[in-house]
Each structure stands twice: as C-alpha cells, then as structure tokens.
Image (spheres, rainbow, N blue to C red):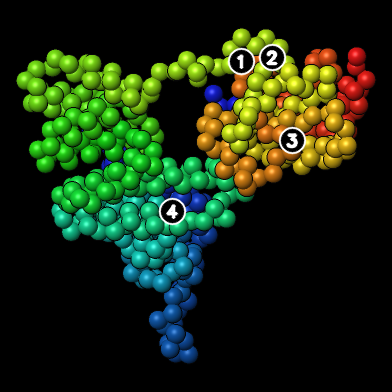
Amino acid sequence: MAEVKPNRHFGRNFIAAIFAAAIFISAPVFGARQQAPPAKSPPPTPTAAGAAQATTPAVDPEVELKATIEAAGNDRAAFVRNLEEYLKRYPETPRKAEILRALIDANMQLREPAKALDAAERAIAVDPQDTSTLMLAANLLEQEGGDANLARAIGYVTRVYERVEKTPVEDKPARDSEAEFLSQQRSAEMTLLLVRGKLESDRLAYDAATADLQASYKLKANPAAALQLGEIAEMQKKTDAAIEQYLLAFVIPSMEGAEVDRAEVRKKLGNMWQLAHGNQSGLGERILETYDRLYPPTKSDDVNPNAAAKEPYAFVLGRPSGSAPLKMSDERGKVVVLDFWATWCGPCREVEPLIEQVGQMFKSSSDIVFLALNSDDDRTRVAPYLAKEKIAGTPVFADGLDALLNVHALPTVLVLDRTGKIAYRSDGVDPNTFVTSIMMAILNAEKAK
C-alpha cells in the first residue's frame, strides 16, 4: 500500500460555504429516516373505557414525523410549517436537534435568514457543542448587523475557538500524526481568530480586533489578517501602518480560510500611498522590497549541496536534529537500507514496526545500515514528530536523493548492495511478505562484490 506524494475580505462568504455544506451533509441522514412512511391507520373510536386516554397520541411520534414530512411534498415552505407544528406537539422529541438543523437548511434555501437564525439558536440550546451551527449562527448574526447581534456572534465564535484551542493532542484521529493534528489545530485557530477580529472590527472594538488579528497572523502569516489590520489603521488615520499592512496583504498569497481580493488590496494600497506621497512613484519598489523581506532570495551558502550529485554516495543528507549532516560516502561498501517516509504518510507509520523487526535481525552487523529519509516539504514538522513517534533507522532528510532514485510514492524502501546498486525496491509495502522479502534482499546484497 502506497500514498502518492503531494506535490473584499475574509468572512461571511467563506463561513457560509463551509457551514452550509456541513448542514447539507447532515440533511441526507435525516432524510433517509423519512423514506416510505407506513400507511397511517385511523385512530380507534373512543369508548367510555378509553375516554381517560383520549389525550394520548393515537399515532407513534416517529410515524407522525414521517407523515408530517411526506405531507409537505416538494413544498419547502410547507415543510417548514409542518416541522414547526410538529415541534409544538412534541417539544421534547429526541429528534429535536435534527429537526432544527433541517429547519435551518430549509429557511436558508427559502432566503429567510431571520427564521434560519431562530432555528440555529434553538438548535444551539439543544446541542451547545454543535460547532457548525454555532458558526452558522455567528454568520447570520453578522449579516443581520447591529451591536447586540455582533456581540452574540463574537460569543459563538469564542466558544468554538476555546473548544478548538483546548482540544488535547490525545483526542486526535488515529490516522493523523501529532504533527498533522497540531498543524490543523493551528490553522483552525488562525481562521477563528480572523473571524472574531473581523466581528470586533465591525463593532469598532479596534483594540480587541487588533489583538485577535495579530494573533491570527502570528499563527500563520495570512493576507486576510493583514488586510483587516490595514483597514483598522486607515480608520484610525495611521497612514504608514495602513500602507505596511496593505503591502503584506498584497504580497502574501491567498490561502484557504484567508482569501483576499488582490485587486481590492491594490486599490487600497494605491490610495494610501497616494495620500502619503502625492503620487504612485516608488510604490513598485516598495512592493518588491516587501516581497524580498518576506521571501528572501536564496543565499550562496544555502545552495543545495547535492545539486551536482549524480549517484547516491555523492549525497550529503541533513539531520532533523540539526547535528552534522550524514555523508553517504561514509556508507560506501556497506549494505544500505533506505526507507523514504513523511509525517503525513499513514502507510509509512504502518511499515515502521516491520522495518524495526528487520533491523533487530541485523543489529549486530556494522556493515548493514538503516536510514529513514524524510520527504516532508515542511521540515518544521519533522522534529516534533520524531519526539513522539518511533522511527526505525537513522533519521535524515532525503535532500534530493528521493528524486535521483525516482521515489514517487511513500513509503518506498530500497536496498543498496555494497557496490551501490539497487538490490531491492518496494514502492509501497505488503505487510504479509515485506519482512521475508527484504531480509532475503539484505542477505543477498551482503554477498555482492
């Protein structure tokens, strides 16, 4: 099994898209329970003996819910009316949260944001941990406007942010590495702080907004936070600060959760520059200066030491620990097992115990070397990952050796014999045969002259 190597403003549109999708995803589950309701039997004629039970529903609530939905047909307005009536009859139904989410979706499609907001806030009262509904309610409150509504929206976003911030790494999905979990958590916090900062700015609470936007930018340099900080500076007549933030917003690429309209940013930047200098002269140079400051050109001492390497033993491989690099030339004449992996690669984690098992078989031989070559683009993930996860072999960076050896999927395991020739290659690993096949490959490679 192998995994292929991955080669206007923030706010309402993005949030609405994300959380409308979340509601949409939940809708089919609810709908599936509504299919093919059984025929509704007429209630029995009351008798004297049954008069005391006349107030008891003649139909099971679940059956009545299905009939209620079916009665609306394709009429979405009738669907809303029927569900609202049902909730009046059965206010404590265990399906209440599902019904309210269906009402949110229907009212959104009917372009009834006030009714969608009412249903959302009732849903939050039923399930205070419903992240999607909390964010949708915040979005609807922002659209409605007004200081009280914005304050409520900030409260909802804060609840989600605190929940994300306090989620321990122990709660991560089993398939995610700790580095992946922390990266996703950092991105979520960046976006939530950005949303809250925008809402605070709308309330004219500029100090709180600035603190949140700066925290968002610190988590990950993003153009949306810089744009909003520029607008706040412009509102406060801080021309130089506004120019600096607009420069950042213009230069930094848009990213998921923090998109900006570059034409809008260019217009704002030009207006501020014109105000400060009386013309546009020098703006281009300042943009280039900002770009070079954020993305400095490669220095001569940062040139890839393996750029001219044409064979494995010519490579020098950096170490995640920051210690002296490993020279492949020092391994010439040995059998070298190369395990190419990445922190984001699920199958790589599955193969590690197998490589460890093979390594134990040959641990007494100094002529058999196991190297774990990391292929992450973002090297900052690697050291934290290694602090938590056990890797078989000496961890080093691939540093171009993966390209030389045509590694296009992970995990890939190769064995170099004593002459440097590839004696074994596995693009992906079959756990049923891997240990035996690589063990035999190593034994055969030892014999090569």
Residue nearest the viewer, comparing 189 with 383: 383
The mark nearer the N terminus, 1 or 2, is 1
Residue 161 in the image: x percent, y percent?
38, 53
- Image coords of residue 236 (percent x, y): 11, 41
Residue 48 is drawn in which quadrant? bottom left
**Which image quadrant for residue 308?**
top right
Q: CA distance from mark 1 to mark 4?
A: 42 Å
Residue that numbered label 1 is attached to: 306
Classify 10 Å Cα crowding around label 1: few (below 14), some (14-19), many (20 and above).
some
**Are discs 3 and 2 less than 8 Å apart at CB?**
no
Q: Real-space Cα distance between discs 4 and 3? A: 35 Å
Eyeballing the image, is 159 above or below 193? Answer: below
| Residue holding disc 2 | 314
Label 3 and label 2: CA atoms lie apart by: 20 Å
In the image, taking residue 318 as reference, residue 104 lies left or right, namely left
- The residue that disc 4 covers is 164
Q: Mark 4 vs mark 3: which is more N-terminal?
A: 4
The answer to whether residue 95 is above or below residue 305 is: below
Q: Secondary structure at mark 4?
A: helix
Q: Is residue 117 visible?
A: no
Mark before the other along the chain sequence, 2 or 4: 4
| Relative image position of residue 262 (x, y in whole percent) | 26, 25
Q: Report the front residue among 190 and 160.
A: 190
Instruction: Name the residue that disc number 3 marks.
Output: 393
